[in-house]
Amino acid sequence: MSTELFDLTGKVAVVTGSGRGLGRAMARGLAAAGARVVVAGRTASDLDESTADITADGNQALAIAFDATSRADCCRLFDETIAAFGNLDIAVVNHGIGRAKPAVEVTDDELAEMIDINLKSAFVCGQEAARRMVDQGTGGAIIFTSSTGSLVAFDKLSTYGASKGGVDQMCRHFAQELAPHNIRVNVVGPGYMEHHMRGAGERHDTPEMAEHIRLTTPMERRGRPEEMVGPVIFLASDAASFVTGHIMPVDGGYVAI
């Protein structure tokens, strides 16, 4: 099979939450596959570093700082992307937060924050990307980042798991509604990765956690950020032209056992 199916030359991609970690790896990978990439997030200095990584490889990138919880900012993100590059073909909705706390101790404000950032703002970003793709009439691909926490239970992650479960189901509904417009909508769900969200290091970087991951993950290790690239390129490309509404764990087999 020709690798041309995975070629994104001429495509324009937006990756939210791409100032660091998994998002930066995804953005860099999409650019290496030929896409012109907009790196988007809340911290301008992080975005500048991601953009520098991409342009150092000889690829095109533009940084746009935005607040994912603001519809106006989401609209501005996609409008500025189209103004700069002429089109919107791929939207990777990757931003999010993680908080660990027993369910019985979660406050109303903590629950609202989790749902607002992980679910509501993902919905709005996906919705605004879809509106522009529908108007263009040329199809597209929307990829949400969820988590294995949407599929199995983890200690003290009830609100996080609930928000990501909502993302999975949102993906299925978007996929059904947007299919007539040739817009495919899918999810990648990272498992235990070497790079995790801010604030998670204290509970992740311990010998006990390393041993837990070894025992519960068939591949006996954490994933590397660059191992998110292949799944995202696949779902963004013509190689996945008949794939929509799919929830793809990228977890070394964790949810398989």
Image (spheres, rainbow, N blue to C red):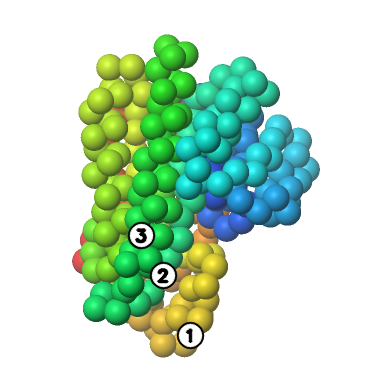
Q: Residue at x 24, y 78 (%)?
A: 104
Q: In the image, which disc is placed on residue 99?
A: 2
Identify which amino acid the numbered label 2 is placed on: Arg
Q: Is residue 152 left or right of residue 2?
A: left
Q: Quadrant of residue 31?
A: top right
Q: Is residue 19 visible?
A: yes
Q: Secondary structure at mark 2?
A: loop
Residue 129 in percent (x, y) is at: 45, 29
Q: Residue at x 41, y 23 (%)?
A: 131
Identify which amino acid the numbered label 1 is placed on: Thr
Q: In the image, which disc is placed on residue 206?
A: 1
Residue 17 in percent (x, y) is at: 55, 50
Q: CA distance from mark 1 to mark 2?
A: 17 Å
Mark 3 burial class by Cα count in 10 Å: few <14, some 14-19, many 20+: few
Residue 22 in percent (x, y) is at: 53, 54
Q: CA distance from mark 1 to mark 3?
A: 29 Å
Task: State how many labels appear.
Answer: 3
